[in-house]
Image (cartoon, grey):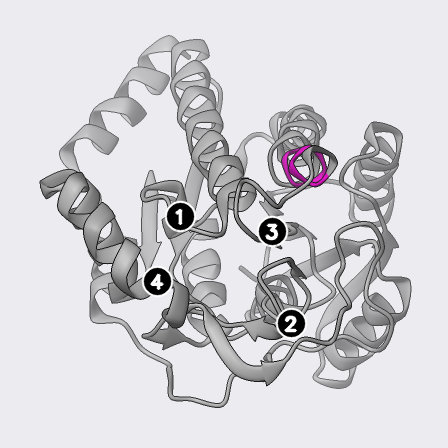
Amino acid sequence: MSEQVVVVLGASSGIGRATALALAREGASVVCASRGAEALGTLVREVEEAGGTAVAVPTDITNPYALEALVQAAEGRYGRVDTWVNVAGVSVYGSVRDVPLEDFRRVLEVNLLGHVAATKAALPALERAGGGVVIGIASAEGARAVPLHAPYTASKFALRAFYDALRVELAQEGSPVRVTTLLPAGISTPFWERSRNLTGGHLTKPPPPVYAPELVAAAVVRAATHPRREVPVGGAAYGFILGQRISPALTDALMSLVMRRAQTSDRPDTGTDVLDRPAPGPGQVRGDHPGHVARHSPATALAARLPRPGELLTAARARLAR
């Protein structure tokens, strides 16, 4: 990691901020990008105070010109890009009946098309550097749909498919760029307080068990040097995947019974969100989740370290094409 230049898009808070800090602690030079200029400034200061190296580049992931400028800034400052991490995402909670069509469009614009545009900007830079890794933060909801979260779930299903298609195309071309998709379960970040909430008067919350954002950051750091095809983060993510594979109809029934309560807190909603504009303030890694937060996941540690036979074959196909 001490030899890498890493771009983190969505670095101002939550998983992105934890990732930037973890990468800097490992010695990487980090290019921190998001819409929130103030939060990026505090992040860079935090990195530098800890002895790391970072630069802030305010960037809107939905603006292709801003993404090209981000690439130019990274290469102009450090000479290359070795790893590119797409974290940026927004959310709307509410029933399909209640969520306006424009909110659906906005979630897809950021969570799907933003990642597509960012990846298209990143690929030439990674190939100019001789190879690297695109790391996309999807979600366990990209494997199993969740009620009251249709815009986000739909975007993550599509995002997971996008990274799958890209991975195969790069192998066919013999590109030296690898693609890793992370599928986090419920993570204790400000995401829940900053989602647009159309469900009523109470804040949404991650369904238990809830995991620390540093767990996702550690998976990103590992993937930057040892890329894997896909890494679920948190044991609950495996529960989502297995439920969908073994009995999706039974999982439908269980979710219809428990998920509304599991996603609703006892705290009043603040009426604020980051769907259309960044959150003000200095930024933070953790959210206000009051319950237990797990800091370790043996299943995730194993998935991040053990390549599957199919991954080895895909890598061999890429080498053969080169």
Foreground tag (2 vs 4): 4
The secondary structure type at the circle numbered 3 is loop
Residue 110 vs residue 314: left or right? right
Dot 1 and dot 2 residues touching (CB under 8 Å): no
Residue 42 on image: x %, y %: 83, 77
Q: Secondary structure at mark 4?
A: helix
Residue at image position (48%, 30%) is 158
Instruction: Give the labeled residue for mark 4.
Output: 259
Q: Amino acid at mark 4?
A: Met
1 vs 3, front mark: 1
For marks 2 and 4, the one nearer the N-term is 2
Disc 3 + disc 4, Cβ < 8 Å: no
Q: Earlier in the sequence, mark 3 or mark 4?
A: 3
Reading the image, the residue beneath label 3 is: 87
Q: Which numbered circle lies on residue 193?
A: 2
Residue indicated by mark 1 = 141
- Magenta stretch: give its range: 103-108
Residue 295 in picture, x, y percent from top left: 37, 81
When the figure is inspected, residue 137 is found, relative to residue 285, above or below; the finding is: above
Q: Is residue 104 magenta?
A: yes
> Residue 44 in the image: x percent, y percent?
80, 71
